[in-house]
Amino acid sequence: MVIGPPDTALRIQIPILVSMSEIAAFAQVKRPVVSTWRRRYPDFPAAVSERSGRPLFDGAQVADWLITSGLGNATPAELRSELALFGIVALRERFTPWQLIETLGSLLCLRRLDSRPLTEGPGGPPSSAEADEVLWSAVLRRAERIDAEDDFLLRELRSLDATAAPLARLTEDLVEAAYEEHGAYEWLLSARSRLGLDSLAADAVAPELRRLLTQLADLRIRLEHGESLTLADPHARAGDLLASLLD
């Protein structure tokens, strides 16, 4: 998956080029299914580039096609979130994994505290050096106003320059898919291993154990009986177990 040249027609303004294997991954199907779609449906998006002789497709066009056609096993929200996450992963060459998590988390926090989008609509205006400068300057002004005492996010955002503006656009795409900042941040944390943040992924609770502990806690029945509950995890790390219990 690579970042392609700008295209102002796309909703996601950092054009994301994806391979057929990557299409299969975010559509939640086997790789041969994508070949079948490409052969059987004449309106399947055409390849826009290639890498090592393999075709690359515009990720936004493919996601829109999947949503319109209803094919694949992913919901529209999952497709949009996956596309945004693909874009974030593609920026690992520009930012460290910790920078990605900290910056995106800070941007989500700013959006929540300010109760306004970070950009002009989903994805914002097309990315260019001038547009990035304007957008990031606006983000920093809002951060200085909302968090003047640097209690939450100001230091993290001030540590970066306008090259981080694409992250503000991708933040909006994540929120659009998740419908609110909390869900967007949970998606972001769930993708931490893909971002290369191994220190937070190494000791993650296995899905089977997480389901077992959720069943044993039986929060729904306890809450229906009006019981008072205290949830604690002495080794919370990224909070997977607590998030699972509260879902």
Image (spheres, grey):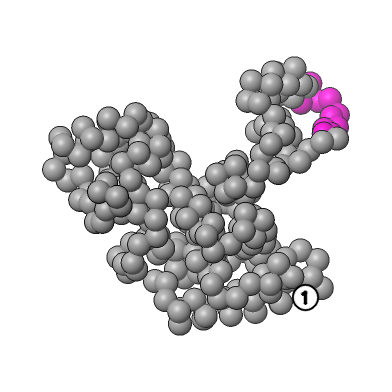
Q: Is residue 99 left or right of residue 32?
A: right
Q: Quadrant of the C terminus?
A: top right
Q: Is residue 66 left or right of residue 162?
A: left
Where is residue 27? Give x, y as percent.
Answer: 37, 37
- Give amino acid for label 1: Ala
Q: What crowding class fits label 1: few (fewer than 14 Cα within 10 Å), some (14-19), or many (20 or more)?
A: few
Where is residue 45? Give x, y as percent.
Answer: 22, 49
Q: At 63% across and 25% down in the image, what residue appears? A: 207
- How would you classify the magenta stretch by its main secondary structure? loop
The residue carrying mark 1 is 148
Q: Between 89 and 176, which is closer to the camera in this rendering?
A: 89
Q: Is residue 243 left or right of residue 122?
A: right
| Magenta-drawn segment | 223-233
- State the SS at label 1: loop
Residue 202: quarter of image? top right
Q: At 33% across and 45% down in the image, what residue appears? A: 19
Q: At 81% across and 25% down in the image, what residue appears? A: 226
Residue 9: quarter of image? bottom left
- Is 230 drawn above or below residue 112 in the view shown? above
Q: Between 80 and 117, which is closer to the camera in this rendering?
A: 80
Is residue 99 among what the camera can see?
A: yes
Residue 226 magenta-highlighted: yes
